[in-house]
Amino acid sequence: MNKKAAQISVQAWESDGILLEKYAYTSGSVEPLLRHSHEEYQFGLSFNCQGEYHYRGVYYSIPTGSLSVIHSGEVHAPSDRTFLTAPAHFAMMHVKPTWLHMIAAEMAEKPASLPFFSTAFFTDAKLNHLFLALQAAAAQENSKLQYDAALWDFLSYLIRRYASNSPTVRALKSTRSAITLACDYLHAHYTSDISLDTLAAIAGLSRFHFCRVFRKELGVSCSAYQTQLRIAQAKKLLVQGFSITKVAIETGFYDQSHFGWHFKRHVGVAPGAYVSKTAIIS
């Protein structure tokens, strides 16, 4: 009897040399991929199945929940399994070396070598959290600031924690005045699609050090701070009787669904449950 082929669905997002993917396989027969290499670094996180790689002359079994890494330019082959007994779901990231080179240089505050990872996978809950936050920021079409911050958080943590040639990072110094300038800008433009580049330039810091200092001074990321400002204004508008759709637009959210998701996370209830006024201002 012929084995039924697995059904495969893929979601993908691409921006400026970074490709993010989410794969979903049903059970069934699959065709192993050929050995290959690519310019990009490749990272993968399996949600519910063990990963497998032939890499650097070694067979690696990647535990579920571990982030795999394939270095730029290295020949590798994925699993040679021909049948999946259960559904498999995993996320992938392909990123050009220029991104890691640039982040390493900002961390060191001088030219730095390309990060090198000597192992094939990392088991680290925080690293996984940062990777998934990046995937979510891309998939939900959140603000540019949220995507930018998630990207820098993930790659800088990865390099600092796991690169064998990780650059030395200087100790944090108080830069409250610089962060105040960035906060003032966020308060004045919280509905705008602000980039990390813009805020870092206003603060007079590199993007890497801006992210570190902002979180140290305020306890949250710059993107979370922007979202808090939006939610605070949204609550005021809802109380005044504005419709949920109008509030979402007026406070800079992508759409009503995006607004509702963030509102419930910050307030604990959906926007519709926040007030019970019947008079709606159009």
Image: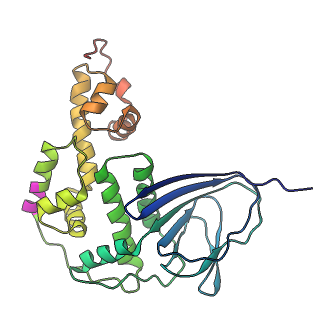
- Image-quadrant location for residue 242: top left
The chief SS type of the magenta part is helix
Determine whether, in the image, residue 87 is placed left or right of residue 70.
right
The image shows residue 30 at horizontal and vertical percentages of 74, 61
From this view, report whether residue 125 is shown above or below residue 220: below
Please check the rendered image and state whether residue 161 is part of the magenta-colored stretch, yes or no: no
Q: Is residue 53 visible?
A: no
- Image-quadrant location for residue 89: bottom right
Q: Residue furthest left?
A: 177
Q: Quadrant of the C terminus?
A: top left
The image shows residue 182 at horizontal and vertical percentages of 13, 55
Determine whether, in the image, residue 218 is placed left or right of residue 132.
left
Seen at 28% across and 28% down, the residue is 247
Q: Is residue 133 visible?
A: yes
Q: Residue furthest top?
A: 279
Seen at 19% across and 69% down, the residue is 206
Magenta range: 176-181
Please check the rendered image and state whether residue 179 is part of the magenta-colored stretch, yes or no: yes
Determine whether, in the image, residue 114 is placed left or right of residue 111.
right
Determine whether, in the image, residue 11 is placed left or right of residue 30.
left
User: Front-most of 263 and 22?
Assistant: 22
User: Front-most of 3 and 231?
Assistant: 3
The image shows residue 250 at horizontal and vertical percentages of 24, 31
